[in-house]
Amino acid sequence: MLDGKSSRIDDLLRTLECIDLDRFSLKHFTMRVENIYEVLQNEGFPESHSFYQRLDNVAEIIDSYFNGRRDYFGVLAGSTIRVVMNGRLIVTRAYGPNLKIKWRFNSQGRIDYIKHFGDNYCDKSLVEVLESEESSDWFIRNAMHKALPENSYLINPGIPQQHPKKQIQSVIRFGHGVLKEISQGKEIRDLELNSGQINLSEIYEDKEAIEIVDTGAVIFPTVIDYSKDTLVVRYRAG
């Protein structure tokens, strides 16, 4: 069992290890790593302690992730939107201060996961597609899913009254709807940016990102099978 001092540092590391890297800027993560390193030194932990190795591992992952990453931010059709391009396209839409939905799209515009989060640091999974490594342009795919958060009415007031199958289908379609809005250039407005961020209006100059946006914008997903923990999604052109 960890003592109080070790338990506090373990909590700091666990929080850092569970945060999705698209949530914050490189500057933010660098500051968190440096702060934990300073705590370790001030508390007298020897550099051979496993805490240092865990911190080094996180720092290495952070450096690798942010190499070549583009982080777009702005307002789209009245909602705050963040789009991160780093091999895959990650779109986050704010539905108020306590609920944000995040969709990740592969190179062919298919969603491979959906997560939600509020004020806390750790994201919670909604949908995780069991994607084949051999192909990214599949048309039918199995997925794992979880129940929507209690405040899902913020996404759409009618969602809580829907059958769970329809709820998940709606959230999947909403993600493709965001891509359609970006593709059509609807009501984009720039906001004050954090360090390293780019105005959302500049995403149209990003060929890699726009190819995914335009491909995903015309895809219409349907949940064709549903059970307590799994579902089957079918894709077709909208």
Image (cartoon, grey):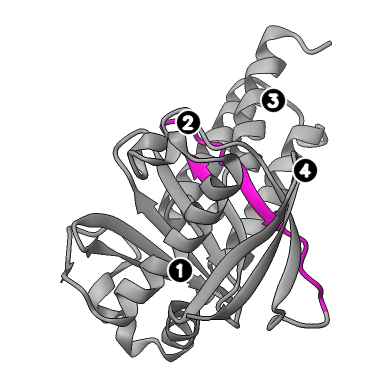
Residue 195, image quadrant = bottom left
Q: Nearer the viewer, mark 2 or mark 4?
A: 2
Label 3, secondary structure: give it: helix
Observer able to see residue 42: yes
Q: Earlier in the sequence, mark 1 or mark 2?
A: 2
Please give the residue where the numbered disc 1 appears in the rendered image.
176
Callout 4 crowding tier (Cα within 10 Å): few <14, some 14–19, many ≥20: few
Q: Is residue 127 magenta?
A: yes
Q: Earlier in the sequence, mark 2 or mark 4?
A: 4
Observer able to see residue 194: no
How many angstroms separate mark 1 from mark 3 (CA)?
A: 38 Å
Provide the residue span drawn in magenta: 115-133
Verify CB contact (< 8 Å) between mark 1 and mark 3.
no
How many angstroms separate mark 1 from mark 4 (CA)?
A: 40 Å
Horizontal relation, residue 66 to residue 75: left or right = right
How many angstroms separate mark 1 from mark 2 (CA)?
A: 26 Å
Q: Earlier in the sequence, mark 1 or mark 3?
A: 3
**2 lies above or below 206:** above
- Residue 230: x, y in percent? 76, 48
**140 lies above or below 56:** below
- Residue 211: x, y in percent? 47, 88
Horizontal relation, residue 156 to residue 224: left or right = left
Q: Residue flagged by tag 1: what amino acid is it?
A: His
Q: Residue flagged by tag 3: what amino acid is it?
A: Asp
Please give the residue where the numbered disc 4 appears in the rendered image.
53
Q: Earlier in the sequence, mark 4 or mark 3?
A: 3
